[in-house]
């Protein structure tokens, strides 16, 4: 596994700042990450709150793996509000990592580490296991192909601990979206659920290893127990929405990849 990368092949993002927000963008008009100046650890972009739905199933994760740093919204939130948790963040772009100070991403310490590596290579080669894997693999060209492959999903499942949860942010407008969903469905033997994010063209996919993904295996009270008022304010409504959707019994139906022409 490579630990460092030649920065030349990787696009250099731009940081925009005003009195209210700091944002990370690869192109004008394409938001990658957004931070509130007054509340830098808040989850401003809605899909990031949806990603935290893993707490419904894994209330106190010992180790979280995050693929994709961006502006560090999820990394900061978990670092500050899950003090019992170790966090490893992997990002392929050294320019993104170099901008961590603009977004108040914490320095590496005993329970927080940022690694410059290809996320697909990392999960293939690592000998560590994780309670939660969060995948938010977008770059200047959109959704990462290597982080949507069958091999990546299988490697991630292998390093996920029993009853662990994987949460994946996907572009629902991607032409191969149904193919990617089918790959997750196959890898996790149907233990998956797709949650739409109303404010953007995103789907957050939750997949569980060795645990049926149903409301019977979720606990909203336990997800928020002993959490700070900030966590309740930020997450209670969204975790409740996820719980209700899953309780309704809506589930991802298998798709026939032959219906998606030329995409495998």
Image (cartoon, rainbow, N blue to C red):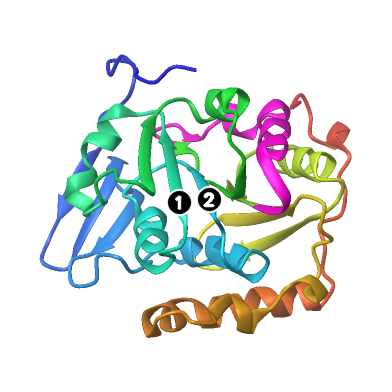
Tag 2, which secondary structure?
Answer: strand
User: For residue 155: magenta?
Assistant: yes
- The residue closer to the viewer here, 264 or 58, is 58
Looking at the picture, tell me which residue is in the foreground, 157 or 110. 110
Q: Is residue 137 above or below residue 200?
A: above
Tag 1–tag 2 contact (CB < 8 Å) = yes
Is residue 197 visible to us here? no
For the point 14% across and 55% down, which residue is it? 17
Quick check: 176 left or right of 197? right
Give x and y (percent) for residue 109: 30, 46
**Quarter of the figure that contains the C terminus:** top right
Q: Is residue 129 visible?
A: yes
Q: Which residue is mark 2?
A: 63
User: From the viewer's perspective, is residue 146 above or below residue 82?
Assistant: above
Q: Which residues are magenta?
A: 139-165
The single residue placed furthest to the left in the displayed view is 19
Res. 38 image quadrant: bottom left
Q: CA distance from mark 1 to mark 2?
A: 5 Å
Question: Residue drawn 62% across and 40% down?
Answer: 129
Task: Report the residue marked by disc 1.
Answer: 86
In the displayed structure, 93 sits above or below 175; it is above
| Mark 1 neighbour class, 10 Å CA radius: few under 14, some 14 to 19, many 20 or more | some
Classify mark 1: helix, strand or loop. strand
Quarter-wise, where is residue 225 in the image? bottom right
């Amino acid at each position: 596994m490579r630990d460092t990368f030649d920065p030349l092949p990787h696009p250099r993002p731009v940081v925009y700042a005003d009195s209210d927000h700091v944002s990370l963008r690869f192109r004008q008009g394409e938001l990658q990450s957004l931070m509130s100046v007054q509340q830098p650890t808040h989850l401003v972009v809605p899909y990031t709150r949806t990603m935290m739905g893993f707490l419904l199933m894994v209330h106190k994760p010992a180790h979280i793996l995050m693929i994709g740093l961006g502006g560090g919204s999820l990394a900061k939130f978990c670092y500050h509000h899950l003090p019992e948790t170790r966090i490893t963040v992997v990002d392929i772009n050294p320019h993104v990592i170099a901008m961590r100070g603009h977004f108040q991403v914490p320095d590496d310490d005993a329970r927080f580490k940022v690694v410059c590596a290809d996320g697909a290579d990392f999960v293939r080669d690592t000998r560590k296991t994780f309670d939660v894997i969060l995948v938010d693999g977008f770059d200047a060209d959109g959704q990462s192909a290597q982080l949507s492959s069958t091999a990546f999903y299988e490697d991630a499942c292998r390093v996920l601990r029993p009853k662990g949860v994987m949460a994946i942010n996907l572009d629902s407008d991607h032409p191969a979206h149904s193919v990617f969903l089918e790959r997750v469905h196959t890898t996790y033997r149907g233990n998956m659920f797709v949650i739409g994010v109303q404010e953007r063209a995103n789907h957050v996919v939750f997949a569980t290893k060795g645990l049926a993904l149903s409301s019977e295996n979720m606990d909203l009270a336990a997800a928020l127990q002993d959490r700070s008022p900030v966590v309740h304010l930020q997450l209670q409504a969204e975790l409740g929405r996820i719980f209700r959707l899953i309780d309704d019994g809506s589930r991802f139906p298998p798709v026939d990849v032959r219906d998606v022409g030329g995409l495998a």
